């Protein structure tokens, strides 16, 4: 299985089934799931703390265990986001498509291209 | 387009193209992308703050604009996670499959089923 | 030493000296310090995850080690905030006094008293 | 009032009184207060996003409104941390003194001085 052949629904179903097998879908209140997302984001951040961008990239290229740890923490982040999409019945493809379309209007290519000041990733 | 028919690669490509069009892929250092993820997680959390779980679910069911705002903030969260997977060349399907397999060994169904104490979502 | 007799400057000086002894004040860029704050906030959050408010309060009252862990994580959070105030030369007393004064105008007592909808803690 | 002359208790009392005046101390569950801390940390982070350390320092030195915004967001962060210390009856001076003492044993000066690899700020 890889990103090239796996649909978002399939990966959502994996998250759902893992939690269903353990009878954990009942713990799907959004406060806790978002707290979990916040905690996992912190754990991902720990891997980058006090390191410069070139140091991080070099370590990813040379230290397989380091890259694996990033991979595991990023998996946890996405797991939480998918659990939130399940708990809210939000279609992520639809949500991202609409948000990008909205951002395209807000940040027209000819106005912002290469502009470091306002990179419009977080609004 | 919907989660049922869209591959992870397709949605990653949408994120890549949006940033490429604006010449923003050069701003892909992991410190900033993870900071952006953390900021977006905070913005999602704002929508749930000071509300009980039933209040949140009722508002999702009755207030279309509220659900849309959750959808937009969740889209931003996932956008950042996808940008991180692009910057690190991590296959998310592979990462999540492996992490769930690891968690299945750590939290065997017969030991943890329905157990509220240790729900193994954040390690 | 206790909160009743210790000035903010004294506790800032403790943070400064701890880092100075280790020659760590050179690592005071705000990106990393804020990332550290975000990580520590996540670690504090882990202690409350999947627990209801009454469960948390009961455990604080009955489990000394639990309360100690909250105390340690909260100390780490405040440590990072103090390091940020040192790196930016911000007087916290002045900053908080002004912010509360601003919030008092924004949330007049007669308008918001006991109002659960908009509790004005995060703007 | 300044950090040099203000005790931690005084500033905690300011936070308590602001919330008491509005009858908001009843909203002191730790899940929400920690979520608020996490949101405020994100808002502080927004001010540093996509900026290099020298860019941030230069802007602090030259743009009074920028420094004021940092000051306001940092005030919100500390406000939340103080509200958590009130809700848990944790003496911050005691907590930080003990945590630094513990870290001093974990990171002896002669072993870690100037060591960029492990800077022991987040454990």
Image (cartoon, coloured by chain):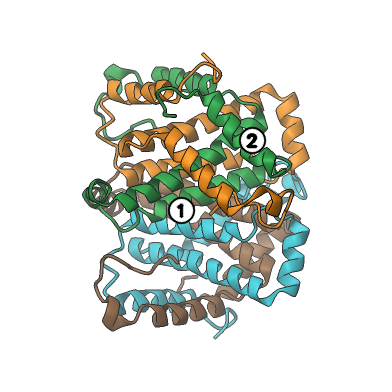
Chain colours: A brown, B cyan, C orange, D green
Seen in the picture, residue B76 relative to B39 is either above or below; the reply is below
Spot occupied by residue B61 in the image (x, y as percentages of width and height): 75, 72
Instruction: Give residue B71's quadrant in the image.
Output: bottom right
Q: Which residue is mark 1?
A: D43
Q: CA distance from mark 1 to mark 2?
A: 24 Å
Dot 1, how many residues are within 10 Å of its Cα: few (below 14), some (14-19), or many (20+)?
A: many
For the point 25% across and 70% down, which residue is it? Answer: A115
Residue B111's spot in the image, x, y percent?
Answer: 74, 44
What residue is shown with label 2? D17
Chain at tag 2? D
Q: How many residues crowd mark 2 within 10 Å: few (<14), some (14–19), many (20+)?
A: some
Q: Is residue A59 left or right of residue B73?
A: left
Residue A111: x and y, percent? Answer: 28, 79
User: Could you tell me which chain the residue with mark 1 belongs to?
Assistant: D
View extreme (bottom): residue: B1
Residue D26's quadrant in the figure?
top right
Q: Taking C82 as reference, is A70 above or below it? A: below
| Percent x, y of residue D35 | 59, 48
């Amino acid at each position: 299985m890889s990103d090239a052949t796996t649909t978002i629904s399939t990966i959502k179903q994996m998250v759902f089934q893992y939690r269903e097998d353990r009878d954990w879908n009942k713990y799907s209140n959004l406060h806790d799931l978002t707290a979990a997302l916040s905690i996992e984001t912190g754990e991902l951040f720990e891997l980058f703390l006090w390191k410069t961008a070139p140091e991080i990239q070099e370590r990813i290229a040379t230290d397989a265990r380091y890259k694996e740890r990033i991979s595991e923490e990023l998996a946890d982040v996405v797991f939480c986001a998918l659990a939130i999409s399940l708990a809210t019945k939000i279609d992520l493809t639809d949500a991202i498509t609409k948000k990008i379309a909205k951002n395209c209007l807000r940040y027209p290519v000819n106005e912002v291209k290469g502009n470091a000041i306002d990179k419009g990733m977080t609004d």
